[in-house]
Image (cartoon, rainbow, N blue to C red):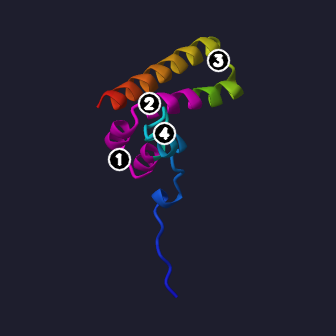
Amino acid sequence: MYFTMMSPEDYMFTCLNKKLFGFECFGCGGQRALVHLFHGEFIEAFKMYPAIYPLIMLFGYISLNIFFKFKNGSKIISILAITSIVFILTNYIIKLIS
């Protein structure tokens, strides 16, 4: 009996926005960027979805803040959230123009 190695790409969700309307959504590329990260391809992950690193920092900081309650936690979370939104919007606009 053969066991085939399935890659993470075999389990990815298809973008409904792209499928129904023909253009990418704000999160297109995020799953592929995570696969690149897991493979250690950090530059490729950034090229695929530049917001991956600000989002990781945001969720990591939120997780730490739950347990340790940093002094300026809400301010730092706001800055990281705004940074993530700027990266997401910039990436989306560049994809629409290209």
Asked if residue 51 lies in the magenta stretch, the reply is: yes
Point out the frontmost of discs 1 and 4: 4
Label 1, label 2: how many angstroms apart (C-alpha)?
15 Å
Name the outermost residue toward the front.
21
Find disc 2 in the rendering and name its residue.
51
Image quarter hosting the C terminus:
top left
Disc 4, disc 3: CB below 8 Å?
Answer: no
Point out the frontmost of discs 3 and 2: 2
Label 1, label 4: how many angstroms apart (C-alpha)?
31 Å
Disc 1, disc 2: CB below 8 Å?
Answer: no
Point out the frontmost of discs 1 and 3: 1
Q: Residues within 10 Å of mark 3 (few under 14, many from 20)?
A: few
Find disc 4 in the rendering and name its residue.
21
Find disc 1 in the rendering and name its residue.
41
Find disc 3 in the rendering and name its residue.
70
Of labels 1 and 3, earlier in sequence is 1
* Picture coordinates of residue 45, whole percent (x, y): 38, 41
